[in-house]
């Protein structure tokens, strides 16, 4: 492989200083509860209103959303929910009999409470609200609490509308570490979340990780800066490649975008075009920083090396602009979500095509996918044995327990064999002569 363009910086890691700040904030909230949250909201968001969005205010905000925007949000909700329901139907409860008298089964039980964080900042993330809330509801979660940082006097109206049609049971006008902790501890709602999902800034991500690490709840993924890769061969249109790279670079100042190609002429043309496309943006500064500091173009010798490089980077989004798309689908192994062909830009996945856009970053795609319905489901197993089935299973379990040196386990098996089959000649004497 050869770099046609190499990054000059690496995405910022969560420093020990950030972690300590978040640890201190969480400790304050855990000790002082709602009063600590109120103080943090005043400090960071200049917020001194109620946190739970009232029905009256919610309706006022929804009334501000133009019908054309409502229609588009409805479309996004329909696509995302449809995919999430298909995911839910892809896994099922079942029961099987592995041996006569051995009943084994699987149950799917939704989480009781899900906390969905919807980021604020420069954008009104209506689609992100749908991705988390609608997916939780498709899983059957009875109580979904959604929160987002207020922008002035309220959450963005479009975000509120997206939360509402997606089925949020409670909406909190709150952001940052205090919002994540509020949902985890059940402050103001009395409903502690079993799972926290949704992207946020580095402090939000750190808070989710810490709350997951101490056993308070589970989380979806540890989210870092958005990252996108394009795999392109000589058949790709350089303008399409460049536009799609820039579209993802606008996510943040430190959002890396990468091009992996086996065509030198394509790579060099994209290198020439990208700065021109960035300069034509209404606000070019963010994309310019992302491209100049974190953007890369890597030239590979063939498809096999392209796959190797892709799997090494394990990008959050991987877009394939190349011939023989089914070959790439069969051979690429590590990514957050895959976008096949020129007709499928990552922007579609970010907004409304269906699959979830809350995805793994920082190479987590090597071992995990993104947010999905299954994250909100507890997959439990159960088993039941008849007395007769103990003759086979109990005897084998007894012998295996002693192979492993676990005498207590073996005796639990022995007891049942002796109790259910007292007249059979078992090769143990434990409990036969005992009376307690």
Image (tube, rainbow, N blue to C red):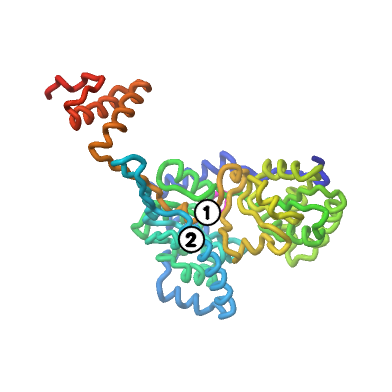
Residue 417 showing in the rendered view: yes
Whether the residues at callouts 2 and 1 have beta carbons within 8 Å, the answer is: yes
Quarter of the image with the N terminus in it: top right
Tell me the residue that label 1 is attached to.
Answer: 371
* Residue lying at 17% horizontally and 26% vertically, measured from the top left: 423
| Dot placed on the residue nearer the N-terminal end, 2 or 1 | 2
Residue 278, quarter of picture: bottom right
Quadrant assignment, res 3: top right
The residue drawn where x is 56% and y is 41% is 17
Is residue 253 depicted above or below 282 in this figure? above
Dot 2, crowdedness within 10 Å: few (<14), some or many (≥20)? many
Vertical placement of residue 45 versus 415, above or below: below
SS for callout 2: helix
Residue 210 percent coordinates (x, y): 47, 43
Looking at the image, residue 431 sits to the left or right of residue 288; the answer is left
Give percent across and percent down for residue 191: 35, 57
Going 49% across and 52% down the picture, which residue do you hit? 177
Give the image location of residue 293, x and y in percent.
Answer: 75, 48
Does any portion of residue 153 appear in the rendered image?
Answer: no
Q: Please report the bounds of the magenta region as a residue range.
A: 199-204
Q: Which residue is mark 2?
A: 135
For residue 158, what is the image quadrant?
Answer: bottom right
Q: Residues within 10 Å of mark 1 (few under 14, many from 20)?
A: many
Q: For this view, does 329 lie left or right of residue 209? A: right
Of residues 401 and 373, which is closer to you in this image? Answer: 401
Is-magenta flag for residue 132?
no
Secondary structure at numbered mark 1: loop
- Residue 107 screen position, x and y as percent: 36, 51
């Amino acid at each position: 492989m050869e770099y046609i363009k190499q990054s000059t910086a690496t995405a910022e890691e969560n420093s020990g200083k950030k972690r300590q700040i978040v640890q201190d904030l969480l400790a304050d909230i855990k000790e002082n509860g709602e009063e600590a949250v109120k103080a943090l909201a005043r400090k960071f968001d200049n917020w001194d209103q109620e946190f739970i969005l009232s029905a009256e205010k919610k309706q006022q905000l929804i009334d501000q959303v133009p019908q054309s925007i409502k229609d588009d949000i409805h479309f996004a909700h329909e696509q995302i929910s449809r995919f999430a329901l298909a995911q839910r139907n892809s896994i099922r409860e079942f029961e099987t009999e592995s041996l006569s008298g051995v009943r084994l089964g699987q149950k799917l039980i939704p989480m009781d409470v899900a906390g969905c964080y919807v980021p604020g900042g420069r954008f009104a993330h209506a689609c992100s609200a749908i991705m988390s809330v609608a997916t939780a509801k498709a899983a059957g979660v009875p109580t979904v609490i959604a929160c987002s940082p207020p922008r002035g006097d309220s959450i963005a109206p479009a975000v509120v509308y997206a939360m509402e049609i997606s089925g949020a049971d409670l909406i909190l006008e709150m952001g940052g570490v205090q919002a994540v902790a509020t949902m985890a501890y059940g402050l103001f709602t009395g409903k502690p979340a079993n799972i926290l999902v949704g992207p946020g800034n580095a402090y939000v991500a750190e808070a989710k990780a810490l709350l997951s690490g101490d056993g308070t709840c589970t989380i979806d993924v540890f989210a870092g800066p958005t990252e996108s890769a394009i795999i392109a061969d000589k058949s790709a249109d350089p303008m399409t490649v460049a536009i799609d790279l820039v579209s993802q670079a606008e996510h943040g100042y430190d959002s890396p975008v990468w091009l992996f190609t086996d065509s030198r002429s394509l790579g060099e043309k994209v290198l020439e075009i990208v700065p021109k496309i960035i300069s034509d943006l209404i606000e070019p500064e963010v994309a310019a920083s992302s491209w100049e500091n974190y953007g890369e173009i890597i030239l590979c010798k063939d498809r096999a090396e392209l796959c190797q490089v892709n799997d090494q980077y394990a990008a959050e989004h991987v877009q394939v602009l190349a011939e023989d798309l089914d070959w790439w689908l069969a051979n690429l192994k590590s990514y957050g979500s895959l976008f096949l062909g020129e007709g499928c830009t990552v922007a579609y996945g970010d907004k409304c095509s269906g699959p979830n856009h809350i995805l793994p970053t920082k190479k987590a795609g090597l071992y995990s996918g993104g947010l999905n319905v299954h994250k909100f489901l507890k997959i439990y197993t159960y088993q039941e044995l008849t007395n007769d089935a103990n003759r086979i299973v109990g005897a084998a379990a007894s012998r295996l327990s002693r192979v492993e040196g676990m005498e207590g386990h073996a005796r639990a098996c022995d007891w049942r064999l002796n109790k259910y089959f007292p007249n059979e000649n078992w090769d143990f004497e434990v409990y036969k002569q005992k009376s307690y």
